[in-house]
Image (tube, helix red, strand yellow):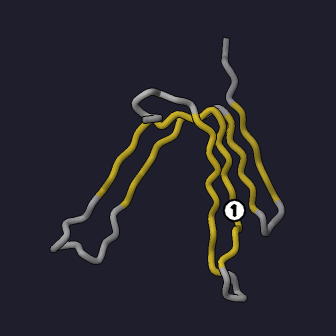
Amino acid sequence: MAMANREKVNCIINFYRVSDEGPHEKYYTVQIEDCEIAELMVQVPHAVLENQIEPVEQMALRYQTIRWTHHLANTSGYAFWGNEE
């Protein structure tokens, strides 16, 4: 419904990987504010000819604020797009 209504949302996307010790670790986070879903595409491979390929969902986002955090390197970045008038 957010895409159909052009609703603005906030989202947090966490990235995990298998650590050297074995368990999963969160190593990267992207935080997005005042975000609109600009495009949504679902790719479903042919069930017989490409049965080894998983379905893929791809989303394009339009946002005002974004923050990147690399937890293991203890670094972060920030970008803000304001109203240009």
Q: Residue furthest left?
A: 48
Indicate the position of residue 68 as horizontal and vertical percent values: 71, 51
Q: Residue at x 16, y 74 (%)?
A: 48
Indicate the position of residue 5 as horizontal and vertical percent values: 44, 27
What amino acid is at disc 1?
Tyr
Disc 1: which residue:
28
Indicate the position of residue 66 as horizontal and vertical percent values: 68, 42
Total marks in image: 1
Q: Secondary structure at mark 1?
A: strand
Q: Is residue 25 above or below residue 36?
A: below
Q: Residue furthest right?
A: 74
Instruction: Tell me which corner region of the image, top left, top right, bottom left or bottom right, holds residue 14.
Output: bottom right
* Quadrant of image for the N terminus: top left
Q: Residue furthest front?
A: 1
Q: Residue at x 47, y 35 (%)?
A: 2
Instruction: Tell me which corner region of the image, top left, top right, bottom left or bottom right, holds residue 46.
Output: bottom left
